[in-house]
Image (cartoon, rainbow, N blue to C red):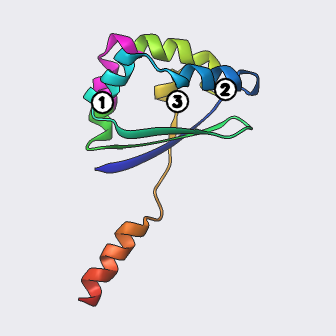
Amino acid sequence: MRRVCFVLRVRPERLAEYRERHAEVWPEMLRALHGAGWHDYSLFLHEDGLLVGHFRTADLAASLAAMERTEVNARWQAEMAPFFVDLDGRRPDEGFVVLDEIFNLDAQLAALDTTEA
C-alpha cells in the first residue's frame, strides 16, 4: 500500500466550522472513501490553517477516480470548497498538493535487516 500525504490551506476564519464539519462526516461519504480504497485516512489541522491529510491506498489514481464517480463526493467537495484558499476554481480533491515521502523508518529498518543478515 502506498502512503499518501497531501496539504491544503483552510481559511483562518473557517477553522472552527471546518473542525465541526469533520467531527461527523456523512456516513455515505465515509463508506464511499472506504469503498474507493482509502485506508487509515486522517486529517491534521494547524491553527494557521495548514491542513495535512494522510491515507494509504493500493492505487492513488484508481482511488481518486473511484471517488470521482460517486454522487456523494461531488456534494461533499462542493460544500468543502469554500473552506479553502488557493484552489483557483478547483475542488479540494483536485487542488490538494501531494507531498513526496522522503523518509520512512520502517522501510529503512527493513533494508538494514536484509543487508545485515
Give the residues in magenta: 64-73
**Kind of residue indicated by mark 1:** His
Determine which quarter of the picture holds residue 79: top right
User: Residue at label 3?
Assistant: 95
Query: Which residue is painted at 34% across and 30% down in the image?
Result: 64
In the rendered structure, are the residues bearing label 2 and label 1 in contact, judged by CB atoms less than 8 Å apart? Answer: no
Q: CA distance from mark 2 to mark 1?
A: 27 Å
**Kind of residue indicated by mark 2:** Val
Q: Which mark is residue 34?
A: 1
Q: Circle 1: is it few (<14), some (14-19), or many (20+) Cα within 10 Å? A: some
Residue 13 in sight here: yes
Q: Main secondary structure of the magenta part?
A: helix
Compared across the picture, whether 112 is left or right of 5 comes to left
User: Residue at label 2?
Assistant: 85
Instruction: Indicate whether residue 16 is drawn in magenta.
Output: no
Q: Position of residue 20 (x, y in %)?
A: 61, 21
Compared to residue 23, the image places residue 104 above or below, namely: below
Q: Circle 3: is it few (<14), some (14-19), or many (20+) Cα within 10 Å? A: some
Q: Check disc 2 and report its element: helix, strand or loop.
A: loop
Query: Which residue is painted at 34% across and 20% down in the image?
Result: 68
Question: Going from the N terminus, do you reach mark 3 or mark 2 first?
Answer: 2
Compared across the picture, whether 110 is left or right of 89 comes to left
How many marks on residues?
A: 3
Q: CA distance from mark 3 to mark 2?
A: 10 Å
Query: Which residue is painted at 48% across and 17% down in the image?
Result: 77
Q: CA distance from mark 1 to mark 3?
A: 21 Å
